[in-house]
Image (cartoon, coloured by chain):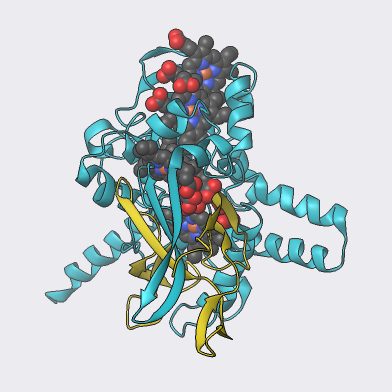
Chain colours: A cyan, B yellow
Amino acid sequence: MKLAPLWVKLSAAAFVICAASPVFAEKAGIGWQEGIAAKSGKAKTMAELAKMYDSSSCIDCHQDTHNDWNKSIHARSIFGTSRTAATFKTAVINGLMEWPYSGVKKPEDVKVEHLMGCAKCHLPQLADAEDSVAKEIIATIDNWQDALKKKDNAKATAEADKLKGLNINCLICHNRNAITHKWTDGYPQAGVVYGSKDGDHPSDAFPKMKTSPIMSESIQCGQCHGLGPNMELDNPTQCCTSYGSYLWAYTAEGGSETCQDCHMKKSKLGHNMQSYRDPGMAKAAVEFKAEARAFHWRDGATIKPKAVVKVEMVNHAGHSIPDG
Amino acid sequence: MPVPQQLGRGDRMGRGPYEKSGIIEDTGLPPGKEVRERFDIFFPTEEVEDENGKWVTKPTASELDLEVKLWYLPFGTMNADPFLWDEFKQTVRISTTGK
């Protein structure tokens, strides 16, 4: 008889959890419910996810910034130079499907959690989507590769454009990922663009401006530019490590410039953040000097003339190059 | 480039970001440190008989065209997107008199 009340309690508790089961897992901190994703609920399709963080309204007033950003690879962050999309697929075929405990036997088994090992940086907003979106991304990469094989250019372009439609846009840097320390500074709120000041912002969908304490700090970029193995994942991945190199090989040795100083300001590229493919960046990166001379070297009685070439190089970037 | 370790274990390099964890070595240029390279290049020589009938080693040329190229290999080989960062060209000479 003593057991009965306990059972009732347990099932009541279980019921409460089910009934209140939010689209998003409860977070411990305060104010996360006011974020874009928590308000709109999880995206079910790639189109819905693109809409959730739709930055097209920003173009009207920030045309130059948009044009600059559009030239950067952030505007194609899961397509990349096409190698990125292809490698997402390889990660499924040669990674997930080969590992016995991943739960992926065929591409259709892929869930958001499986892709977060890449999307963490290439498309952080995938965390605000349902598994159907992860499957749709992989299917779209499939369709794109199929169309390329069949030389169906129109279809290949359409599928590639669909992949390019999901990217790291204004709202990722100026809203979703604008605050790293959310218990200290608060969770990013819907309707706010985060930058360097507080006040009114003349946009209907985003009527407020707020200061993000990290917008001019290296950690803003560091969120996605890699430290080493991503240990928070059940199966750690590792891609770019420029933030790790920046911390341990640059600032630790006395370097004092931020990513923004070099990539946005000194480069004068602003939102068109670039690597060596931009001639100015290539020039800024490496100092290269060489000198040579020749003489008659003597090995005992044998004359062996030789040339000696001495090369000196200094990398003036804020991290090791190449990155990898 | 940083040579990543495969799945954080052993002596194999990992290739795809899904299997990379750890770094075995970094062959790239570290920031802010001078990196020096020195190359010793011998002139081509041949064995010739001198006027006294003795076999001696003689250079076949007194000039050498040198070219140093700094290649950036984002994927570690010349097969994938090599980028020529800088180059240096000079012709060096050795004297043809004296012994």
Question: Is A81 left or right of A229, judged from the image as shown?
Answer: right
Image x and y of residue A5, in percent: 18, 67
Can residue A224 be spotted in the picture? yes
Residue depicted at x 25% and y 42%: A29
Q: Quadrant of residue A178?
A: top left
Question: Is A229 left or right of A83, judged from the image as shown?
Answer: left
Vertical relation: B47 (above or below) A39 = below
Q: Who is closer to the viewer here, A244 or A45?
A: A244
Q: Who is closer to the viewer here, A245 or A49?
A: A245
Vertical relation: A167 (above or below) A295 = above
Image x and y of residue B55, in percent: 52, 89
Q: Who is closer to the viewer here, A56 or A16?
A: A56
Which quadrant is home to the N terminus of chain B?
A: bottom left
Can residue A192 be spotted in the picture? no
Q: Quadrant of residue A70?
A: top right
Residue depicted at x 35% and y 60%: A15
Vertical relation: A166 (above or below) A18 = above
Residue depicted at x 35% and y 61%: A230
